[in-house]
Amino acid sequence: MNAWAGKILVVDLTTRESTCVPTGDYSNTWLGGKGIDLALLLAAECWQADPFSPENRLVFGTGPLTGTLAPAASRVHVGARSPATGLCGSSNIGGQFGPELKYAGYDHLVIKGAASEPVVLVIDDDSVKIQPAQELWGLGVSKTEAALAAHYGSDFRFFIIGPGGENQVRFAGIRSGTFNSASRTGMGAVMGSKNLKAIAVQGSKAISVAQPERFYDVCQRARREILESPCYENMLNVPKMLRGSTHTGYFSYGNKESIVTPIEETISKAEDFLAAHRVGKAACFSCPLRCQDVFEVPGSGRLGMQCDPRVEFNYMTQVDDPTFAWRAYVICQEVGLDTTSIANVLGFVNEALKAGDLSWEQLTKDVNVSGKDRAELFLALITAIAERKGIGDLLAEGVARAGKELGPSFEQRAMHRDGLELAVPEPRTHLGLALAYSVSERGDYLSGFPIFEMVGGEAGRAMAADAFGDGQIANNAADRQTLTDKEHVQTYMENMAATADMLGVCRWMTPTNGAPIKEDTLAELLTEAVGETYTGDDLWSYASRCRKAFFEFDGNCRREKEKQLLPERLFQPVSSDEGQVAGINKKDLIATISRYKKVRGL
């Protein structure tokens, strides 16, 4: 096969056996990446499996463009039944692992069963071995990676879980390299339930493309378009972009308690800290965007960071010290926890602590913290959650389950959708986010990110006009205070995101991030790589099929999506710098969800 490696590797950790399935059995219907992953989970009826049982499968999927010269062709989709939501878990990761898996000869990797003791799965071209890893169990991510590289060689690429995954924290992620993480929906916890500490892969095989010269020309044209776009400039100056978003009320403060723009001194302090320690930019395989800022802070080594962690920890905990945010981020990377969920959990704790509903003594029992400093408490709680010590054992279940256990007042404070903690972007000031959160395939907003209203103004309208034409939909798409026509925005963004996820390229080079590479260019890349004609409409059909597969999986989990709206707090008025902001109109949101389902054919 051109573009595809041609095989799906299936590894049974219980029997310690591996087999292969032809990718062609699935690619005509599901294309690749997220699409084939969903098909594999549906075929195995994973909706019937407890997320932590051996019957649940953990699937990793590259796309037909992964590992090629296409821009940002690094991505791997990760799926399983989620321990956070009980629905179809979905995460995505860049770096170097995906291309290496393709070079080893595999498009997808399926992990079934569970090992009886900690193991490492080692894939070296046609050699597939399950090796003992008892000495690695309990180690953080960086020490694990150093040990694996020393043992297997620096040419191997790794997927690794930290203590959070080992202890099945419901929002544990999977780490790879210095910069990359499949963070959301608890895929690291599923990996830990299988006693799989790490996956190591090395490959030496080539990926063929049907029309090398024409493929190269389309790749180069796409790269030029990216480098000449405003999106590229934004990636070079992320603090400026975040500052602008903060002043439009895009971020909530505390546990969705208010929409208060932090004072100028706080913003400047964070920018100064990051500028003092920023040492460069980094990129995933074949990516011109270089979205990772690289920082080197004494005592914590060198790490890359994207957008949200810069604001999540400070805003959601109401601790304004940028050093605290950095330390929290570093701990999360080392223990392998989703920063968004952790920041939300800490915001949940902070509100209860302020209200007197959780005492300092309750929070610090069996947790290693000295003094009465909130920042130090929160840092200690991250480690306690990863190790399931003290109250960390309950918080490791996530805010939905912790709130239910602690009582009604705590349930009201639990800011989640279907068990997945909400992120810092604010749906009361940006109503497209309200729809995105409500119909999301996994519980957050990223699968339908309404970037047009985040940008807003004439710039946002121009971006929307490029997608929808110069008309009323474009006007409403850029208006953050209306739900009118947002069903079209949601559908468009979902299709674009799903197309990228199926092809194995990063969404951030597409309009989901304000970048210029749309479905027609992606279809050109696929056409020249595969040697068969694809159009943008063809990719949209695959994307729609993929979206409906999520609804099928979740329907089989006996969950009714339309009845699970956002937390009640978000439908109530909230304070902001400009006075009271109305809550989301529930009737309008339900009507918009209905229009969305009609557009989707659901």
Image (tube, grey):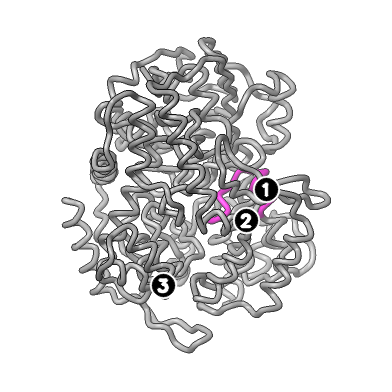
Q: Are marks 1 and 2 in contact (CB under 8 Å)?
A: yes
The image shows residue 525 at horizontal and vertical percentages of 39, 34
According to the picture, the residue beneath numbered tag 3 turns out to be: 458
Q: Which residues are magenta?
A: 329-340
Between marks 3 and 1 in the image, the one whose residue lies nearer the viewer: 3
Q: Could you tell me residue 290's position as x and y percent?
A: 60, 46
Q: Which quarter of the picture shows residue 358?
A: bottom right
Disc number at residue 236?
2
Task: Judge from the rendering whether residue 39 lies leftward or rightward of residue 244; answer left or right.
Answer: left
Secondary structure beneath label 2: helix
Asked if the residues shown at circle 3 and circle 1 are in contact, with their CB atoms under 8 angstroms apart, the answer is: no
Question: Would you say residue 331 sits in the magenta stretch?
Answer: yes
Q: CA distance from mark 3 to mark 1?
A: 30 Å
Q: Identify the amino acid type marked 3.
A: Glu
Among numbered discs 1 and 2, the one appearing first in the sequence: 2
Judging depth in this view, the residue of 537 and 245 nearest the camera is 537
> How many badges with numbers are in the image?
3
Which residue in the protein does label 1 denote? 281
Residue 391 lies in the magenta-colored region = no
Image check: 570 left or right of 206?
left
Left of 259 or right of it: where is 264? right
Amino acid type of the residue that numbered disc 2 sits on in the rendered structure:
Leu
* Closer to us: 197 or 247: 247
| Residue drawn where x is 37% and y is 60% of the image | 437
Name the residue: 54% across, 56% down: 340
Q: Position of residue 173 (x, y in %)?
A: 54, 42
Name the amino acid type tagged 1.
Lys
Give the quadrant of residue 394. bottom right
Query: Does the magenta stretch mainly form a helix, a strand or a loop?
Result: helix
